[in-house]
């Protein structure tokens, strides 16, 4: 199976940071003293996570990017990945593009592929990522304090809008809007530098992969708190004149695949956090506050909460 | 999707050896000082690695066992796994049995599931394993010395014979033979204790997953050596009267999935190595010697080498 050899060939690199890389029964690594190992895995399946005709480069990029996003959410420095991939047939051109995408993302975030398994079967990509974080310093879902500001990075809903575009549901977006949406969907840029910079400033953090309502919900549950957030404060493209309001809300609040960070921090840290965003060129917004009463309340300013069913929360979960 | 919740529920356990387990963006682990991390991954696909009607318990067991075998081959102590699994539809009964099999294997080899990703798609299981090994002590494929004995554990060809049974190719085996073969194919027992015991005695090691000829070939290539091995010395069931000789040779030399260890060691260590086998109740056999001339030669005692094509080497690879 020449393509399996090709991919191993293509992926193989000698790296002084690895004691033993691809080509033995296991890779060997050393964790610097004073650090914990952070480990996460994500599986992407054709037809479930991407359309079969999605460019192979983008599939390669995204397979790694979603894993790096998990490291970002922990405030961990990503270091190494393994790749399990099954592909249905010999397709050297596809594999080459896939490898290029994965390695481009690996290069951008300084991550090394250390091992893997290639096999025949329906297209399925499973990346496992390992990073390091100073002992006891990792950001977790638990840890939010009562009265914390709730922050999100970037703009939400773009990936869901991009998916709608691919499904032929939208026809009125400008060319620029379309390309922003598709880029977010297919080549997400995990907020790694941000995760590392806020590690000492935030109390808790999660990446937004299932949608703001669901992921902030996970964070609140883990922290034993509730929250109120205000629609007008949630950063998103102003598309109220282009698509129905309810649909926009659904994309922003319940659309997945954004890979922005949602975190909580003491109001005393606002200025420092805003400075981090400025240094990185990333918009950071306070969208609400944690509160004692459990559950997540989303409302227009000075209005009663919007019922969660109305934002498609359950549907998208 | 209740079954995904079920599997996470079922798999979740609190363990004092893990700093942070299932349920956050990443798990957090500590590697004891003086140790390297050993990392490996294997992907099992329905239709490629097992028949769709294979008992779910066995699929769960084997998914982990093949990864533990990689740790055994490195002389590493397996510690943690992540699991990526895609399944086509809600099937609680299947998932429960799968979990039971995986966890039974995890318990037997003292391994902890620390994270994972469950998704919808054609059945695919990707386990990634992490173990620890004292720095610089890992067994590798490279490192064989000229004049080393070549050892194998257990008996070879059983899994390939089991596969033949499932394919309806054999009808003359005794009930006992059949159950030995099927057990080897579906519930392999990686040679973990052996790998750990020979770590200081062997020069190089590999587990036999693709067949003796292929895997010993990898070891020799990595070590820059060749070898001669003798058919009569290769441990296998005496089935010469039940199936054709050529077919038996093919199963023993080129059948995969045995998960025995093949290793090389100085002849001076023979007695110590045999003692390890006795203590573990595992048959250990010297089947030949490494030599300077590259390539692998297999022959009947005092006969010229058997051409590798004749043992189905290429076919099975």
Image (spheres, coloured by chain):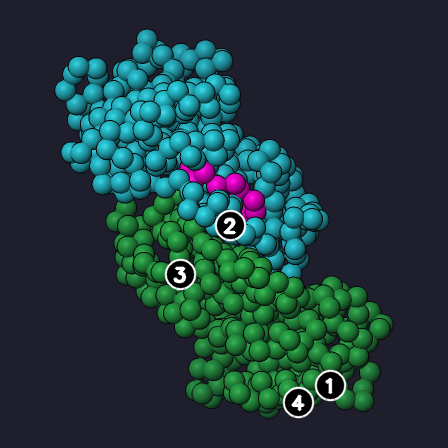
Chain colours: A cyan, B green
Q: Are marks 4 and 3 on the same chain?
A: yes
Image-quadrant location for residue A10: top right
Instruction: Read off the magenta span.
Output: A73-85
Element on which disc 3 rests: loop
Which chain hosts label 1? B
How many C-alpha atoms fall within 10 Å of the one at disc 4: few (<14), some, or many (≥20)?
A: few
Q: Considering only vertical position in the picture, is A311 above or below A207?
A: above
Q: Considering only vertical position in the picture, is A133 above or below A144?
A: below
* Numbered circle sitting on residue B268: 1
Picture coordinates of residue A83, whole percent (x, y): 55, 49
Residue B254 appears in the picture as rendered: no
Comes first in the chain, label 1 or label 3: 3
> Nearer the viewer's eye, disc 2 or disc 3?
2
> Nearer the viewer's eye, disc 4 or disc 3?
3
Q: Is residue A84 magenta?
A: yes
Element on which disc 4 rests: helix
Which chain hosts label 3? B
* Numbered circle sitting on residue B182: none
Picture coordinates of residue B280, whole percent (x, y): 52, 85
> Nearer the viewer's eye, disc 2 or disc 4?
2
Q: Is the C terminus of chain B in the top left, top right, bottom left or bottom right quadrant?
A: bottom right
């Amino acid at each position: 199976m020449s393509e399996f050899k090709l991919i191993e060939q293509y992926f193989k690199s000698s790296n002084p940071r690895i004691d033993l890389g691809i080509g033995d029964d296991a890779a060997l690594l050393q964790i610097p003293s004073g650090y914990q190992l952070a480990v996460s895995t994500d599986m992407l399946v054709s037809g479930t996570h991407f359309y079969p005709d999605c460019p192979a480069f983008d599939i390669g990029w995204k397979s790694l990017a979603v894993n790096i996003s998990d490291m970002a959410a922990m405030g961990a420095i990503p270091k190494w990945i393994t790749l399990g991939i099954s592909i249905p047939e010999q397709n050297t051109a596809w594999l080459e593009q896939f490898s290029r995408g994965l390695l481009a993302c690996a290069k951008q975030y300084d991550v090394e592929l250390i091992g893997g398994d290639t096999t025949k079967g329906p297209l399925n990509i499973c990346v496992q990522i390992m990073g390091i974080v100073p002992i006891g310093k990792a950001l977790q879902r638990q840890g939010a304090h009562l009265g914390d500001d709730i922050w999100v990075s970037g703009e939400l809903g773009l990936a869901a809008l991009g998916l709608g575009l691919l499904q032929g549901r939208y026809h009125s977006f400008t060319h620029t809007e379309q390309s922003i949406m598709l880029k977010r969907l297919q080549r997400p840029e995990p907020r790694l530098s941000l995760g590392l910079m806020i590690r000492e400033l935030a109390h808790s953090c999660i990446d937004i992969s299932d949608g703001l309502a669901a992921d902030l919900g996970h964070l609140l549950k883990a922290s034993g708190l509730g929250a109120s957030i205000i629609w007008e404060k949630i950063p998103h493209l102003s598309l109220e004149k282009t698509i129905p309001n309810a649909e926009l809300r659904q994309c922003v609040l319940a659309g997945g695949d954004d890979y922005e960070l949602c975190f909580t921090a003491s109001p005393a840290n606002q200025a420092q956090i805003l400075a981090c965003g400025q240094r990185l060129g990333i918009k950071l917004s306070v969208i609400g506050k944690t509160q004692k009463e459990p559950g997540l309340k989303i409302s227009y300013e000075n209005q009663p909460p919007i019922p969660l069913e109305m934002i498609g929360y359950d549907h998208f979960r």
